[in-house]
Amino acid sequence: MRMLQDRSAVSPEVKKWLEKKTNFLSHECQDELFEVMATMVQRDIAEEVKKSGWFSVIADGTTDVSRTEQFCVCLRHVDETLCAKEVFCGLYAAPDTSGETLFKIIVDVMRRMAIDIGNLRGMCFDGASNMSGALKGVQARLAQQQPKAVYVHCLNHSLDLALVEEAKAVPIIGDVMNIVRDVSTSLNTAKRRNMFEEHVILGDVSQSTGPGRSKKLLALCPTRWTVRSAAFRRFLDCYDAVMDTVDDIIDDNGTAPDVKARLRGVSIQLQHFETLFAMYLALQIFEPCECLAKTLQKPSLSIGDAIKAANDLVSILDSQRTDQSFSSLFTSVSKRTTELTTEIAPPKAPRVRRPPRRLEQTSQPCPPAELDAKAGLRKQYFNAIDIVSAEVRRRFNQPGVKRLSEMERALLEPGRPLPPESDEVDENKLRSELEVLNSLRPQPRTTTVAELARYIGSAEFTPEYLIEVRKLCKLIMTVPVSAASAERVFSALRHVKQYSRSTMAQARLSHLMILNVHQEHALKLNLRAVMREFVYRSPAKRVPAFGRQ
């Protein structure tokens, strides 16, 4: 309304319309217009999905600002040019989060969009039991309806769980994550942020990273995919300023006793060499992991590219598992302690742990091994790298991923048989087409389905050429590897449903979300068609005002 009022100052037509008694600007009319436009966008999306044939489902849930459970449904399909697309279909307020309810919502979305569940070929959810349960989860219920659908546990969530396992199994990593999170939370209030900025500005030049140095710590959330390394990097760059600010907060009479007690413990820990070493170790591990997390969020990513990126991460971690890498890290941390104005205590040897007597096999057992300080940190270093590497291997080795990898190898490696589940593709014709394709492909040959799809999806090949190869490419690329599209929708949800709009009706929210996420589709809508449908929903009242369209 405010925009229309501003426009009326320079437009007599708008001013005249606003002065009418019936100007069709009520909330009900607005909701109806949003519904008309969102429905048109959904129709366009449904036509694209049906034209592609096969599709996959991506779904995830979150809680909005009004504590309402919002369930997001997205579809992934591959067009005629072999380009994968992930499209948002709607946001739904689930009455509960049981597998049966969420399954009914997904089926209802398909029915409303007139999409045949028989063409479902993939599913990608997180690891929650209501979504991924083998008996009553959504993936199990959808698999009963369509056994050909391949389930993939979101690889971004799998990587995140690997890092969570790292924090649980390696005490020094879990401890420094808690320290960075607690200190960042404490220092990011208005008063304490000003105290921190003063210490950053007045700090020694040796601490500074340049004139553009940030004066705010980044919050560390254990469940976020790509902010861990940045939070650690910022914390380490401002280590002296953090220490000085923590000491000021402890000395401040206005600080609550419980906060003082917690920060005293943090201050003591920050003066230990082991804490600084653990932060640099966490940074060394988290940075390549977050590169993989960013790669996995690409909507066009295929399973082959995802596995290749995961193998690259494992190779990087394995290359760091050497005495030389440990010594280099230990030396750099030791050098860093000399650059800080804060006095850092030297590392301490780990406490000697005597095995329980019930486990002793002889009357005169050997004394327990004693490790010096450096050897104790070396043990923690190798343990941290081993756990991340093993967890990534284990969590990425899923049945659905194996099945897709077999299909991909059959496409890229001559002589490989197709898995029995790939009955949509004629294997004999596929072999003949692959022989033709291998004679045409330039050297070096493609190593992933995405590269092959880009090659045969170019203008050189018509859609009628290499039909079986196209089918298998499309089948493999239809299955998503990540639920990142749903997470991006949740980011948009925070902008659409803010605290000031927390009472927004669910229908209005869902329609606005569709228009917000699919802005390109919305901008291409035929406004005359929109108004025509709006008018003829109630012709008796609206035709006299708008005329026949």
Image (spheres, rainbow, N blue to C red):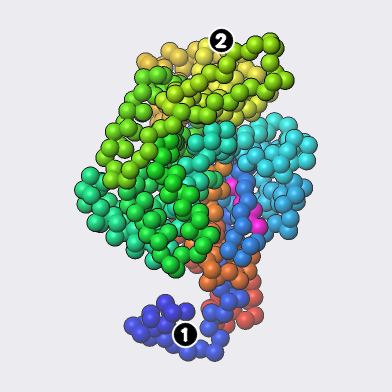
Magenta segment's dominant SS is: strand
Could you tell me if residue 491 is visible in this image? Answer: no
Residue 17 — which label?
A: 1
Q: Residue drawn at (47%, 47%), measured in percent from left and top?
A: 179
**Left or right relative to 418: residue 104:** right
Q: Nearer the viewer, mark 2 or mark 1?
A: 2
Q: Position of residue 219 (x, y in %)?
A: 45, 52
Tell me where the magenta segment starts and ends, as one range: 69-74
Q: Which residue is mark 2?
A: 415
**Secondary structure under the numbered disc 2 in the rendered image:** loop
* Label 2 neighbour load within 10 Å: few <14, some 14-19, many 20+: few
Residue 454 — which label?
A: none
Cα separation, mark 2 vs mark 1, equals: 72 Å
Q: Residue drawn at (65%, 19%), measured in percent from left and top?
A: 419
Q: Position of residue 69 (x, y in %)?
A: 66, 58
Image quadrant assignment for residue 31: bottom right
User: Residue 269 magenta-drawn?
Assistant: no
Could you tell me if residue 486 is visible in this image? Answer: yes
Q: Position of residue 54 (x, y in %)?
A: 62, 36
Is residue 138 shown above or below 470? below
